[in-house]
Amino acid sequence: MTDFLRLAEDIAREAGDMLLAKRPTMSGEVETKSSPTDVVTILDKASEELIRERVMAARPGDRILGEEGGEAPGESDVRWIVDPIDGTVNFLYGLPDWAVSIAVEVNGRVVAGVVNAAQRGEIYTAALGEGAWLGGERLRCTTGVPLAQALVATGFGYSVRRRAVQGEVVAAVLPSVRDIRRGGSCAIDLCSLAAGRLDAYYERGINHWDFAAAGLVATESGARLGGLHGRPVSPDFALCAAPGLFEELHDLLAPLDPERDA
Ligand code: IPD
């Protein structure tokens, strides 16, 4: 596990340094993906290529799932799950909340995760059963926060039909919580929750590469991560908070049927 974590951290650091160096001149070169607002920059692709090359050099035969390149086949029980830039829109606009996210899964279970929020100068790490860390500091999520006092982060998908429902849902949540945040990077939202900077997070439509590494950071900080009605976290729905608050927020969200699109 330590070897996986060390390698993932080295690679995430190298990709983050490359992105920091090239962003000022190269971040404007974009293509669109699922909708006109869903962008991929040339640097998303360069970051994923770098990560794939480094993983393959160190661990030939492992499988890799990346946001931009899809799944590369392999025989190994080990799969690397990569988001080369989570928070691409922030990256494009020069906002600091974007991150390189790398998780290592063994037999379908994430055992190590690294989130390099390079422009913040923060690297979050977690290993299964061994805690979550920001640099030398062990992370613990907030506990005992009632829903009415909770600072809740969420996000919105790229499709208009999904956003219409997400807008309705957040309007219904807002009067019951302290406030809402929309940071623009699922990975950083989950790491912020682990660091006690947010109390809860929910979102419909995030992908495995968005939450694989940061989800481990959050759960290793003491938070519960799951879907609705006892289901595991998935692209259908993600909800994360300390036990207690998780259930309170779940019971507010579930009747709103937030897993639908308009
Ligand atoms: C996005 C971010 C954002 C979330 C979107 C994701 P990307 O990832 O995590 O916070 O609201 O649902 O797609 O596209 O920047 O990798």
Image: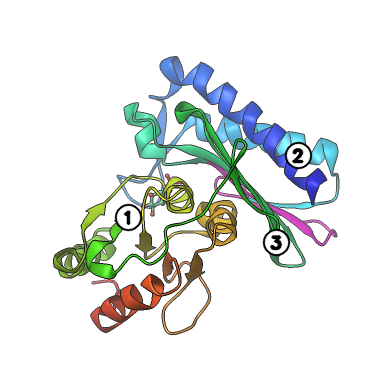
Q: Mark 3 points at which residue?
A: 129
- Kindly indicate the quadrant of the structure image that contains residue 159: bottom left
Q: Is tag 1's residue or tag 3's residue first in the polypeptide sequence? A: 3
What residue span does the magenta drawing correspond to? 66-84
Q: Is mark 1 on a helix, strand or loop?
A: loop
Residue 168 visible, this angle: yes
Q: Name the residue under label 2.
A: 6
Query: Does the magenta run of residues contain 150?
Result: no
At label 1, the amino acid type is Gly
Query: Does the magenta run of residues contain 70?
Result: yes
Name the residue at 47% across, 56% down: 141
Using a 10 Å C-alpha cutoff, classify the residue at mark 1 as few (fewer than 14 neighbours), some (14 to 19) or many (20 or more). Answer: many
Name the residue at 57% across, 53% down: 217
Quadrant assignment for the C terminus: bottom left
Residue 31 in picture, x, y percent from top left: 41, 36
At label 3, the amino acid type is Gly
Residue 206 placement, left or right of 16:
left
Q: Mark 1 points at which residue?
A: 155
Does the beta carbon at disc 1 come under 8 Å from ligand 1? yes
Name the residue at 38% across, 30% down: 96
